[in-house]
Image (cartoon, coloured by chain):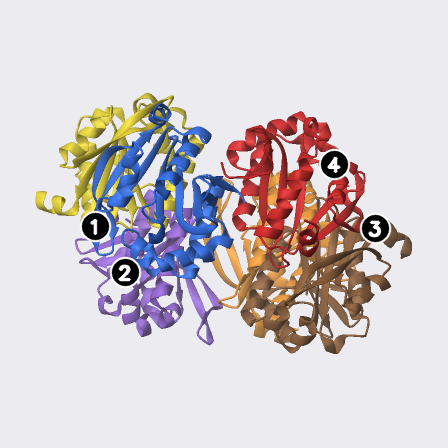
Chain colours: A yellow, B blue, C red, D brown, E orange, F purple
Amino acid sequence: MFKCEVDEHIYLAITEMRHAEALYNVIAENRDHIGQFLMFARTQTPEDTKSFVQTSLNKFSAGTDVPTCIWYDKQLIGSIGLHISEAHRSASIGYWISKEYEGRGIVTKCCEAMIDYAFRELKLNRVEIRAINENLRSRAIPERLGFKHEGTFRQDVKLYDQFADSIVYGLLAEEWRSGN
Amino acid sequence: MFKCEVDEHIYLAITEMRHAEALYNVIAENRDHIGQFLMFARTQTPEDTKSFVQTSLNKFSAGTDVPTCIWYDKQLIGSIGLHISEAHRSASIGYWISKEYEGRGIVTKCCEAMIDYAFRELKLNRVEIRAINENLRSRAIPERLGFKHEGTFRQDVKLYDQFADSIVYGLLAEEWRSGN
Amino acid sequence: MFKCEVDEHIYLAITEMRHAEALYNVIAENRDHIGQFLMFARTQTPEDTKSFVQTSLNKFSAGTDVPTCIWYDKQLIGSIGLHISEAHRSASIGYWISKEYEGRGIVTKCCEAMIDYAFRELKLNRVEIRAINENLRSRAIPERLGFKHEGTFRQDVKLYDQFADSIVYGLLAEEWRSGN
Amino acid sequence: MFKCEVDEHIYLAITEMRHAEALYNVIAENRDHIGQFLMFARTQTPEDTKSFVQTSLNKFSAGTDVPTCIWYDKQLIGSIGLHISEAHRSASIGYWISKEYEGRGIVTKCCEAMIDYAFRELKLNRVEIRAINENLRSRAIPERLGFKHEGTFRQDVKLYDQFADSIVYGLLAEEWRSGN
Amino acid sequence: MFKCEVDEHIYLAITEMRHAEALYNVIAENRDHIGQFLMFARTQTPEDTKSFVQTSLNKFSAGTDVPTCIWYDKQLIGSIGLHISEAHRSASIGYWISKEYEGRGIVTKCCEAMIDYAFRELKLNRVEIRAINENLRSRAIPERLGFKHEGTFRQDVKLYDQFADSIVYGLLAEEWRSGN
Amino acid sequence: MFKCEVDEHIYLAITEMRHAEALYNVIAENRDHIGQFLMFARTQTPEDTKSFVQTSLNKFSAGTDVPTCIWYDKQLIGSIGLHISEAHRSASIGYWISKEYEGRGIVTKCCEAMIDYAFRELKLNRVEIRAINENLRSRAIPERLGFKHEGTFRQDVKLYDQFADSIVYGLLAEEWRSGN
């Protein structure tokens, strides 16, 4: 398979249509968990997942996104993607993981692999991660990886019937190189 | 014409293809001025302007952008646009003006009109303005209008052969209502 | 809002997706009235209105149409649109209005504004209005505005299970200028 | 070939890309002749002809046009097309022919074949032909075929730097049936 | 109509949307017969037929296919199409016919007309016919017409829940010319 | 990177736009070598390579192709792709390699990886390889890998101003499993 190995258990693979069923199943089993901060999970149908995969593939084809699934011992357990601004040589990373696999540092490792890909292969200059203020697990990842807290956007995300603040973290190529 | 009146001299009008020539002329006369913080201005050709206008109209048609030109006594003197995130009920504003008309508070007035449009007509919840750190004239506008400085993105913009920081300002509907 | 003021009560505004609901409501309340000469009104669903608005916006974006709604004291009460032939510097006007607002000269005033826009702003050379032979109210408008009856197209419109004749009226820029 | 036989010398065939070169050659040899009333002929390049053929094929595929070339003894000598309004069960016919083949009644015969196709095969209700007022040869055809002169559109066509009037002729299915 | 005459009873006509209903009816009446070797026939709905016709028209417009229906005494009784590779000057032919009209040599005659069209009009160099190994009726046609058996593709076609072998037959322009 | 490891020196990676320059360079350095049996190589411009990469990515996004480059010690040295027929659970493989790396069994190894991917991951049933009759190096690969020679297509490929025969080789999933 076309994949990026993270460790002996984990790899990332470009999300393809043949993964749509497995992807849907993880979302369906984690509706409340993922849905706490990502509204799509609550109502996602198998058709929605297929549409999402097709849209993601189109963005990969256009060179603006690198959409991947996280695989652990050949089981699809989550998603991590890179969204690229070629003009500004920057990218942002987004991710979620099945509740069952939380707390083992898997997403942190996957982010490291993505950051490496962004800085060393794609030669980008900046990587950004955004998280909803209350999503402490999500925020812990950029903090652990040495990102700098660069801003707090007030009411920047509509989450169900409320507005939430989002925290923006940034990391520069020069920081990654020096820190690794 | 289909316009939004700002004061007795100034109005905003949806940018249409028949404005492309006038728009190009203002850009061409202000290459260095606009180009200091917006790279497109330095190399813009009449064909580029037409492509830009068509892309803007397509975004207006898709409901994600409200691209307008600033007219002063029936002269096209600048540009101001709204970029909308329907899902999050938020928008960002971008603008530039001919050097000759700077310093008279025109952009500030146009921003007020756009903010009013965003909050009162479109019923949005948040408006954002981003400016390059060194662009003090541009930064003065959200500061003057009561926006809150919410973050500083390091090296977030590629400007010619360098990276510049950008400053993000946010304003909430509840603040605008109370302040007006 | 981006509008063309007609008088202190009336303005025209480019039809946007956020107007679709109000537009649908006027159509639904006027199914028989509008539907007498415009078949779409009889069966229009809210989804049809949205499709129509999107198609209209795409035509605006392509520069071939200027689709607007008629607003009276901030109430959407009808529709008037311009269809442009750039190659021949000509345009045609189509319109309908809620039964409740008929008989007050509103459509005539709106047509005047559109004709002014066509001749003075868009610099067109000819404006055309077509009406079904039996639609006397509709025909009265170009007659009142000095259009010339240029032809009668036999069975040119399929109206439900019958064919109707349409009357074509034309007005030239030179006539509008001299007459105003 | 896929054709509609008109007489032992003449047939009409759907215009395909492989006819583009022959089509261009006839246009190029008749620039002044065709160009008198059809502006495209004066400046047409081989690339323009290919674009035109592709656009015509797309319209055929969409069911709105039946674009054909006129062939005489296996020589491409002109063009005749049907533009269909499915909603109103009507169509219009347009045509031109090489100067060399004028005056032999060829276009009249081809129109008859097209009208027959429109009324008997497509079951349309109305066929329309428009001609520029000064184009007496073109006008003679609907007159000869029993069309009724239904209107004169003033300055309805921009021809180079002038505006020309166009004459509209109409024919109904019931008239064709009774007359043939 | 735009057709290719095969004999006094039979002609081929480009498949148009207005033929979709007749085409669907033949398929529906022949579900088992056609469906034995062509899976689409078993489940085809009227909407499927319309989609198929539109796709075929788009391919005709792109110049890669010549999709036709077989008409016998003005009755649609089958389908025959040419799929063209411009780059290699070659084409393949596919066909099916209503059970009722089988055994009269109709498809063989239609194939001859298509081959003639391919070699003499389109100036192609090679025509190919593929048939499922067990489809003896279909295989008889290229064999009768002098095609050479060029290969047997093992399990190359998925037919319901099994894989079938297909036989490939080829004919060269030089062979057709010499043989006719 | 997202890759499929073949051995310690070789991997395959989905062809992305950022590889276009390296890909062009290998083609340009091997115009005569690759061009002997693949016409594109002789005239390929950097723009052609970009178009090819974009088309390939679009096919990957549509799920019909897996276009990859062959990398040897981080050097792009060739290309290998899978073209998939989902309906028939089959695929074909195409490839070329820089002259400098020929004769080391690299393409054979890459084909094995692709075949494994096709049968084990994509669960396909049949893999096909076609080669021009005279291209003995290319033909040696399926022969070495146990494919069966299933047919010889006469004059099936236009190569410059001549027609060449192509040889078709097939391999079934059951054969691969038993043989490995």
Q: Along the line of sight, which residue is nearer the eye, F62 or C139?
A: C139
Q: Residues within 10 Å of mark 1 (few under 14, many from 20)?
A: some
Q: Along the line of sight, which residue is nearer the eye, B17 or E94?
A: B17
Expressed as whole percent of the image width and height from the top left, the position of residue F155 reads: 49, 70
Q: Which mark is residue C37?
A: 4
* Residue F88 shows in this picture: no
Expressed as whole percent of the image width and height from the top left, the position of residue F93 reads: 37, 56
Q: Secondary structure at mark 4?
A: loop
Q: Work out whether disc 3 and disc 4 sit on a shared chain.
A: no
Tell me the kind of residue under disc 1: Phe
Q: Secondary structure at mark 2?
A: helix
Mark 2 vs mark 1: in front: 1
Q: Work out whether disc 2 and disc 1 sit on a shared chain.
A: no
Q: Secondary structure at mark 1?
A: strand
Q: Quadrant of residue B51?
A: bottom left
Q: Residues within 10 Å of mark 4 (few under 14, many from 20)?
A: many
Using the image, name the chain to which the residue with label 4 belongs. Answer: C
Q: Secondary structure at mark 3?
A: helix
Using the image, name the chain to which the residue with label 3 belongs. Answer: D
Q: Which mark is residue D173?
A: 3
Q: Which residue is mark 1?
A: B163
* Residue B147 shows in this picture: yes
The reply to whether dot 3 and dot 2 touch (C-beta < 8 Å) is no
